[in-house]
Image: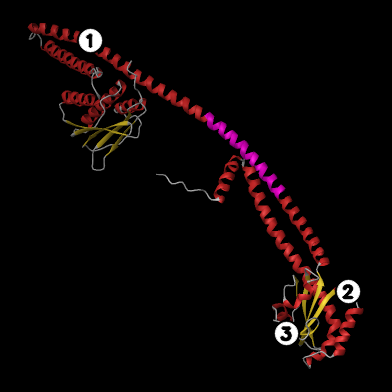
């Protein structure tokens, strides 16, 4: 039973965006990503700058107006340093100032607060209200201002006439000292100030947006040129890769053809050597045998001369030695018929022929070899084992061992002895042309050959022959 988990909305959006993004070029991906980043940065920067402009304009206006208000009202409030209430004449003087001076045209309402949240002048005079944080800061000597929506209970009358006002708290000090004796709270119309704030914010948005657009266009142009260069290089690289792949395919085909040609050449060479062996056996060898028979017919004339007898014996020995060498050469040149044999049988035949020819022991270990093998492979395996055993018997004069196993898709042949040990770097040595021949036989099938000394003494010839490189090359 399969369980299907529905994708979240975010996962669906990522799935929808990931497909088109993958089809974009490097420049397109950068343009999309940088556009999103710059838009987000512009929004955050614009919001922050707008907030700073709003606070700056409000604080600047509040500072200017509070200084103006303090200059007008502070003289009328000095009695609050000595008592909790304003005398009526001071209240009348304040109302007269607000009525006949420009201050009254800019200020909608004024309240004078005594300690403890008690209103001593203005609407709700004599009442006590909770002390707000802005009023606390004013009692500490700070000017605070903000745009308010008049939700507080002491602003009930203004709430019916205005929706938003600028609310400012400013400290009133004793003349000639820093002692705060009262706090003046006054309200201004927010419309003109908000229009100024919006104009300043609009200018800031234009500056931020223009800078973001200029940055985006500059970086996009740079990345576009780089992307075009990379794309052109990528196209050239892809063309080179396709050319290289084509060459590799051609080289592989040529390599197969060369190996097959080498395998056919090896098979033809063995057939030629077989004919040469037959010609030697049927021609010169027979003539030498006939010459020896004719020498035997001259035995009746022996004893007539000491010199003649010595010459006859020398001639007979030379002819007999030449006949043996010729028969041995003919035997070595002639390859047994390997076509009916499988791979294990071929290796067994090579070891058996060596034992019979040299009368030296050789151990054979076969590990799960395949029965089927091409004729060129069997010829190469037979000749390499034959030559390696002959070299080991000639130079090491020690027990021999042949090991054959398959690893991967290659046949591994190890012919080792317990002699003194020697290694070979691949160069031809005097009297060691057989090593070069074994290497060439292995390499003609795409394999390798090496000779190295064993750590505990002795030498091992190692040949690796591909199993599947020459099928069908039996002609």
Write down the region rendered in magenta.
216-243
> Does residue 341 lie above or below 219 as drawn?
above
* Mark 1 neighbour density, 10 Å: few (under 14) some (14–19) many (20 or more): some
Regarding mark 2 in the picture, which secondary structure is present there? Answer: helix
Give the residue number, with chain letter if any, for mark 3: 128
Quarter occupied by residue 283? top left
Q: Which of marks 2 and 3 is nearer the N terminus?
A: 2
In-front residue for pair 192/154: 154
Image coordinates of residue 224 in percent, x first then y, are 67, 42
Q: Which colour scheme is used?
A: secondary structure
Regarding mark 1 in the picture, which secondary structure is present there? Answer: helix
- Give the CA separation, mark 2 to mark 3: 28 Å
Direction from residue 71 to residue 114 in the image, left or right: left
Q: Does the magenta stretch include residue 238?
A: yes
> Does residue 184 lie above or below 421 as drawn?
below
In-front residue for pair 240/215: 215
- Give the CA separation, mark 2 to mark 1: 143 Å
């Amino acid at each position: 039973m399969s369980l299907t988990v529905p994708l979240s909305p975010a996962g669906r959006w990522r799935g929808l965006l990931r497909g088109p993004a993958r089809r974009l070029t490097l420049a397109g991906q950068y343009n999309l990503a940088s556009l999103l980043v710059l838009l987000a940065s512009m929004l955050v920067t614009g919001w922050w700058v707008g907030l700073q402009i709003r606070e700056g304009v409000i604080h600047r206006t509040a500072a200017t107006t509070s200084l103006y208000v303090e200059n007008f009202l502070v003289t009328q409030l000095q009695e609050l340093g000595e008592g909790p209430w304003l005398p009526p004449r001071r209240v009348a003087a304040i109302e007269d100032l607000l009525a006949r001076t420009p201050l009254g045209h800019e200020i909608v309402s004024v309240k004078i607060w005594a300690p403890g949240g008690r209103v001593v002048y203005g609407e709700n005079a004599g009442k006590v209200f909770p002390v707000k944080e802005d009023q606390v800061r004013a009692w500490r000597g700070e000017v605070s201002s903000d745009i308010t929506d008049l939700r507080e209970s002491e602003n009930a009358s203004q709430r019916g006439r205005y929706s938003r006002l600028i609310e400012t708290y400013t400290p009133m000090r004793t003349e000639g000292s820093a002692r705060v004796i009262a706090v003046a709270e006054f309200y201004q119309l927010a419309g003109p100030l908000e229009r100024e704030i919006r104009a300043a914010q609009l200018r800031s948005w234009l500056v931020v947006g223009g800078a973001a657009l200029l940055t985006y266009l500059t970086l996009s142009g740079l990345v576009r040129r780089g992307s075009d260069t990379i794309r052109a290089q990528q196209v050239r690289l892809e063309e080179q890769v396709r050319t290289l792949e084509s060459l590799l395919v051609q080289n592989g085909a040529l390599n197969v053809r060369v190996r097959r040609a080498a395998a056919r050449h090896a098979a033809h060479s063995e057939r030629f050597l077989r004919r040469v062996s037959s010609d030697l056996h049927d021609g010169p060898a027979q003539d030498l045998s006939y010459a020896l028979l004719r020498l035997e017919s001259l035995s009746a004339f022996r004893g007539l001369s000491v010199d003649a007898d010595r010459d006859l014996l020398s001639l007979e020995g030379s002819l007999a030695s030449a006949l043996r060498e010729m028969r041995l050469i003919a035997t070595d040149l002639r390859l047994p018929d390997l076509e009916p044999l499988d791979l294990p049988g071929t290796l067994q035949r090579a070891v058996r022929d060596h034992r019979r020819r040299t009368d030296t022991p050789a151990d054979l270990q076969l590990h799960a070899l395949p029965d089927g093998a091409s004729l060129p492979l069997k010829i190469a395996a037979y000749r390499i084992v034959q030559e390696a055993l002959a070299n080991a018997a000639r130079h090491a004069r020690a027990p021999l061992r042949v090991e054959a196993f398959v690893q991967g898709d290659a046949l591994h042949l190890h012919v080792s002895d317990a002699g003194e040990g020697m290694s070979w770097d691949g160069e031809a040595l005097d009297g060691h042309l057989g090593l070069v021949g074994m290497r060439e036989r292995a390499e003609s099938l795409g394999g390798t050959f090496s000779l190295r000394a064993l750590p505990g003494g002795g030498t091992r010839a190692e040949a690796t022959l591909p199993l599947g490189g020459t099928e069908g090359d039996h002609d």
